Image (spheres, rainbow, N blue to C red):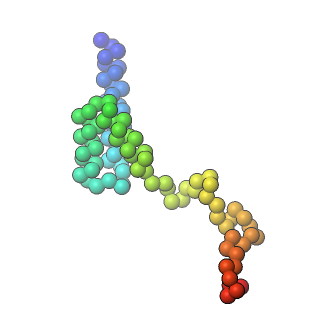
Amino acid sequence: MKPIVAVVLALAVINATVTVLVLRSVSLLRTQKLAQCLIVWLVPVLGAIVVAIFLSSNREPSPHRRTHHTRGEEDYPGVNLYPPHGPSDP
């Protein structure tokens, strides 16, 4: 009986975690949040997995966090990243 309780508890923790992630999402409308929470709780394992994948693929990168391939002027001090394009540019 104890393994069944552990599995049910694990499913509840996973569903609760995904539900919190859905409710904290700023990119979803209220109706979308409600629908996704219903999917998580009505389709026990698959619902949580699908919604978690959707949330991770739909997540926007933080504006203050740069990726490793993004370069800016501070990465090349003393180098003009914007060379002149024609005779009218100084």
* Residue at image location 27% in from the left, 42% down from the top: 37
* Residue at image location 69% in from the left, 70% down from the top: 81
Task: Name the outermost residue toward the bottom.
Answer: 88
- Depth check, front residue: 57 or 77: 57
* Residue at image location 26% in from the left, 39% down from the top: 39
Residue 10 visible to an observer of this rendering:
yes
Residue 55: percent from left, percent from top: 39, 46
Is 29 drawn above or below residue 9 in the view shown?
Answer: below
Task: Name the outermost residue toward the front.
Answer: 86
* Residue at image location 64% in from the left, 61% down from the top: 71
Quadrant where the image shows the C terminus: bottom right
Judged left or right of residue 60, residue 69 is: right
Name the quadrant containing residue 35.
Answer: top left
Quadrant where the image shows the N terminus: top left
Task: Name the outermost residue toward the right.
Answer: 78
- Depth check, front residue: 51 or 84: 84
Is 74 drawn above or below residue 32 in the view shown?
Answer: below
Residue 80: percent from left, percent from top: 72, 72
Residue 69: percent from left, percent from top: 62, 54
Judged left or right of residue 9, residue 77 is: right
Residue 31: percent from left, percent from top: 23, 52
Residue 15 visible to an observer of this rendering:
no
Is 54 drawn above or below residue 44 in the view shown?
Answer: below
Judged left or right of residue 32, residue 67 is: right
